[in-house]
Amino acid sequence: MMKYNFLFLLFFTLSLFAQDSAITMRLSYGKASTADLGEIVTGTNNHIINDYEVVSLNSAFLLGDNFFDIANTTYYSNVELSYFKDYGYSDAYELTMFLKVFYHPKVFKNYVRFGFGEGISYVTAFLQVEKDEAIKENGKNSKFLNYLDITLDFNVGKLLSQKDFYIGLLLKHRSGIFGLINNVEHGGSNYNCIYVEKRF
């Protein structure tokens, strides 16, 4: 339990170094996929499981621009709370904390962003989709796993005269990084989501 407290303190401390007091909120909804991360990203497979749903609320604080001197990027400290509805099985809550970098291609005049987040995920109960994967791969489960947050969104605020209002696609990914975390080699889950995001 000590390591979870330390990580929470780390992300809380990072939020104190935010560039300004503005907070960005994101509300998302999605369903689980039987495909792995590579298949989803490449578009080769993305079979959706309708019985496994997730609703998430995310808060983010801007930490700075030009992440590691990479032009046209911004980076944020994020905390997210999710509710997983597994019909016929136990529901679960998830806490994720992660750092996220956005790339703003100049060619699209900041209408489009690509986002990549890396951090940690803890669930209050084992997700059924992860149990199914563990059984199929003869693997293990863990409530504590690595977390990836991959997004593509469009700034509709520029069209509606609203500041920083986005609609986008999100891939929520939990995994053990091939056994590096809690010996989970083939377990984990992927949820395909849609979201709205607004800076206040």
Image: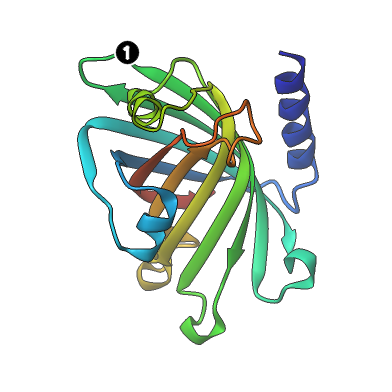
At a point 55% along the width and 30% down the height, the residue shown is 184
Answer above or below: position of 193 versus 53: below
Applied colour scheme: rainbow
Q: Given the image, on which type of amino acid does mark 1 rest?
A: Ser
Name the residue carrying label 1: 90
At a point 27% along the width and 14% down the height, the residue shown is 89
**Which image quarter holds the N terminus?**
top right
Residue in the foreground of this view, choosing between 96 and 112: 96
Q: Position of residue 42 (x, y in %)?
A: 38, 65
Q: Badge 1: how crowded within 10 Å, few (<14), some, or many (20+)?
A: few
Answer above or below: position of 66 versus 117: below
On screen, residue 144 versus residue 28, left or right, reads right
Image quadrant in which you'd find residue 49: top left
On screen, residue 69 versus residue 190, left or right, reads right
Residue 15 visible? The answer is yes
On screen, residue 15 versus residue 171, left or right, reads right
Residue in the foreground of this view, choosing between 45 and 186: 186
At a point 69% along the width and 46% down the height, the residue shown is 21
Residue in the foreground of this view, choosing between 4 and 132: 132
Q: Position of residue 16 (x, y in %)?
A: 78, 39
